[in-house]
Image (tube, helix red, strand yellow):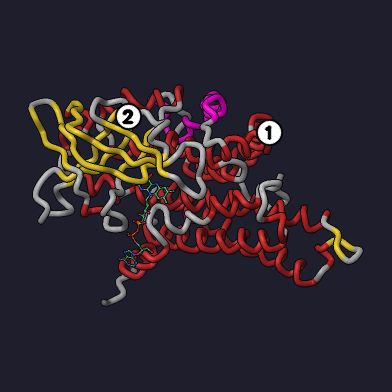
Amino acid sequence: MSDLPQRHEPEHLVMLRETLRRFVEREMPRDRVKQWDRQEQFPVAVHRGLVELGLTGLTVDEEYGGSGRDITAMVVAIEELSARSMAVACAYIQSACYAGLNISDVGSDEQKRTLLPRVATEGLMFSYGFSEPDVGADVASVRTTALRRDDSVIIDGNKRFCSGAGIAQYIYVLARTGKVEERYRNLSLILVPTDAPGLTLQPQETLGLKGGGTFDVTFNQVAVPASNVVGGDAGWNDGWLRLVGPGLDIEKLEVAAMALGISRAAVDDAWLYAQQRQQFGKPICAIQSIRHMLAEVKTRWEACRLMTYHAAGLVAQRQPAAVDTAMTKLFVCDTARDIVLICQQIMGAYGYVGDFDMERYVRDILVMPILGGSSAIQKNNIANRLGLPR
Ligand SMILES: Cc1cc2nc3c(=O)[nH]c(=O)nc-3n(C[C@H](O)[C@H](O)[C@H](O)COP(=O)(O)OP(=O)(O)OC[C@H]3O[C@@H](n4cnc5c(N)ncnc54)[C@H](O)[C@@H]3O)c2cc1C
């Protein structure tokens, strides 16, 4: 359990952390977490346990069966779960954030009525289908198409890097629904069930983020009801605004919270290891260079924590936060990666082998500056939004 300071947190967040830490120690012991990672398993029962604790309801309004939207609590949950297992944390995000928050923000009334209660009580999970083989940072250039045919929508194309598609009930497919020239206007987000005829999943091999898996998804004449267009009729050709609005701001926060959790675990483990490992007749934490590294990672982590919860507070109060979330994603993910690599160095050879969790933290943290808009893209966002002339 972390001995890092958790200052100035309201009582309900302190209680949430305590509940989660007890849950993690009981349901997610280190040996089981290692097994989920090694065997690429998703622990369904643990996800159900989180649903029973009401964790997926943290992003769902009370009228739909949740406990009311609490963005800061959601970030606390992501940090706590990520400090132990990305197999669990990613699935939680797929449910509370992708399904709960996004449908609350941009879904139609019918989608809110039918889907949100299932997020709160069943832990319904969605996956993001934005990237494609030839589409990375330039998300608006997607080539997957969706055509309206009577009351249906027919989808054709290929998506790549759909995290958790194998455990999700739906994929948000970003599809071209009109002329390519009007690239930001003719896009729609469509909810496609993962068991729809014509949809095939192919797992991709990744260095980290094991558990829910990452998939190539092919859509061959996949038909879904037109009511699955996110936002209903109003969402047709309006997918870009539904995507880049609150959804992507919050996604930056989610990724920062994951990085915060992983790096916290790395700091805790390195701190403990340095006190136990003896060389030259004394614990290595007595060596000045190791002491300095330990002091440095604690300090950098604290800066990451402050930045993440500051941005979370702005989003929670529905203040404009696009610049703050971009800065947070950039700084926290890059810094957390550096923190984990320093912690690995502190543990020497044991930071590199399977006996300890450090090698997993390294594998998991490396993707954080890439996911959800790379660090370079965040720098573009910050400079552009602050009006820097080109
Ligand atoms: C494990 C994993 C899980 C993922 N999960 C999902 C998911 O669930 N759903 C999903 O849709 N996608 C997912 N992704 C994809 C991820 O969001 C993309 O990797 C990301 O958007 C960047 O795209 P790219 O890697 O193809 O890089 P590219 O866009 O090809 O960029 C390559 C390099 O060029 C830089 N670059 C590109 N354009 C610019 C620019 N304009 N200015 C400055 N630098 C630039 C990038 O920063 C990068 O360094 C996942 C990826 C991984 C590895």
Q: Residue at x 68, y 30 (%)?
A: 26
Q: Secondary structure at mark 1?
A: helix
Query: Which of the pair 386/369 is nearer the observer?
Result: 369
The residue where tag 1 is placed is 22
Task: Look at the image and say whether residue 180 sits in the magenta stretch.
Answer: no
On residue 387, the disc is: none
Secondary structure mostly seen in magenta is helix
Q: Residue at x 70, y 67 (%)?
A: 293
| Image side of residue 75 versus residue 351, left or right | left
Query: Which of the pair 343/59 is nearer the observer?
Result: 343
Q: Secondary structure at mark 2?
A: loop
Question: In this rendering, is residue 312 above or below 303?
Answer: above
Label 1 vs 2, first from the N-terminus: 1
As shown in the figure, which amino acid type bears the numbered disc 2?
Thr
* 10 Å crowding of disc 1: few (<14), some (14-19), many (20+): few
The residue where tag 2 is placed is 194
Q: Is mark 1 within 8 Å of ligand 1?
A: no
**At which x and y percent is residue 173?**
26, 39
**At which x and y percent is residue 244?**
29, 51
Q: Residue at x 60, y 38 (%)?
A: 12
As shown in the figure, which amino acid type bears the numbered disc 1?
Arg
Residue contact at pointers 1 and 2, CB within 8 angstroms: no
Query: Which of the pair 89/105 is nearer the observer?
Result: 89
